Amino acid sequence: MRISPISDQSVSVPDLTRRDLLLRSGGGLGAIALAWLLNQEEGNANGLQDKVETRNNKQQNRGLHHKARAKQVVQFFMSGAASQCDTFDYKPELIKNHGKPFNPGGKIELFQSSPGAVMKSPWQWKQYGKSGKWVSDLLPHLATCVDDMAFLPAMKSKSNVHGPATFLQATGFVMPGFPGMGAWVSYGLGRLSDNLPTFVVLPDSRGFAPNGPANWSNGFLPAQHQGTIVRPTAKVPILDLYPPFDSGIDRSIDQQTQELLAKWNLRHQQSREGDSRLSARISSYELAAKMQIAAPEVMDISKEPASVKKEYGLDQKETEEFGRNCLITRRLLQHGVRFVQLWCGADNGFPRRNWDSHENIERDHGIMAKSMDQPIAALLQDLKRLGMLNDTVLHWTTEFGRMPCSQGSLGRDHNPDTFTNWLAGGGIKGGIVHGSSDDWSFRAEDKITTGYDVHATILWLLGIDHTKLTFRHNGIDRRLTDVHGEVIEELFT
């Protein structure tokens, strides 16, 4: 929000540079988290309310281009490339031909190895639910939720390199500098809450995925649309929310200082038309002030019933962290956060603690799946029980798949030619499968889908036509789906 001008009679402005003024007036949030308070007092005088923000406030959950089916999104990102043929893509041919030469026909190009023998999954497969969907024993909890999920086993990526492929699923482009999907949703629909960010990111505590914060950047969109990092298990879950304890900063700094800062910020902003950085900074300060009250309440799970904590796996070491993240996600949704992104896996060298199982699929996938299977299933069931699943789209993804043949003797190499996503809630038809890979789970074969299609579909559920949500940048009308993407209407109820 922009700040209403202050009367020249109310404050005497010293002959200072803006930098000197800020240095002298201190850096406390009590002084600089001012815009919201001033807007309340000034009543948004002179019509300086940002036009986009006004449009966003009017939209709420009605959608931008058509009636919305959902208002919130949770994206689970399995960083490192979760294997489709060990999770959701059942292929009897791999079991039948285990140990034999891998010969699906045509040229086989791998990321860092030569094709090994056909390798069946180390886990057994069973059918679940009324739909009879096959799921491996690696994911016993998610397997019980298949009738609420729509599976996309014919996903395909443009890249078999982690960084570009992660960007593709997170931002719609293989290059850096583009907004994350949550940033686009924030830009298109705005806030559901005045007290919490629109787009929140919960990274793996062990580190970031490839590309780090660039995956949830605002890119060329106004800066206030970037993702806000929350670390529920850290001593300080949200950085820079409070002034340092030893700073000596008093939160009740004189109101005249606030008014003076508002006047100078406004003057600085008016002389730099088209530069969103100051506006975003002011917006972040006002949001930080409100988060000082709202965030601790959201992060405090002490009053959650013991049965709920157990359901999310907070009583087990393997599931405690991701379970807490999922429980906090539910609370964030309840308090009006529009887009939450949870990361499972970190790009932190060797031994790997992500899904990039080149050496030993059973060991590495076993650890990673254990950490997220029960918590995600608990979140889905919890949202359903609370009546929130109808308004919330859940999206499980990874950057690409893995090969059906072995790397070495126990691992699997990268496979961009087929992998699996699933969607649930928010108008998604459960218990269905759209598309298929070949008999080997080597190449997507029928009803091939891409990240562009998934992004277009999620936006449509939120009431957004992906071809119309654009932003002019360097002479190009950019959009999340670039020049691609088809809404997958078969998934809708």
Image (cartoon, rainbow, N blue to C red):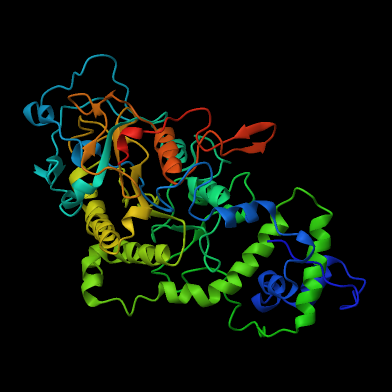
Position in image of residue 175 (x %, y %): 53, 35
Q: Would you place residue 414 above or below residue 275 in this image?
A: above
Position in image of residue 147 (x %, y %): 19, 46
Q: Nearer the viewer, residue 329 or 465?
A: 465
In which image quadrant can residue 449 be found?
top left
Q: Give the quadrant of the C terminus.
A: top left
Q: Is residue 24 left or right of residue 122?
A: right
In the rendered image, is residue 315 in sight? no
Position in image of residue 389 (x %, y %): 32, 56
In which image quadrant can residue 152 be found?
top left
Q: Would you place residue 474 above or below residue 201 in this image?
A: above
Hey, which residue is sitting farthest top in the picture? 106
Q: Is residue 290 left or right of residue 113?
A: right
What residue is drawn where x is 27% and y is 42%? 429
What residue is drawn where x is 24% and y is 27%? 437
Position in image of residue 341 (x %, y %): 42, 53
Q: Nearer the viewer, residue 246 or 32?
A: 32
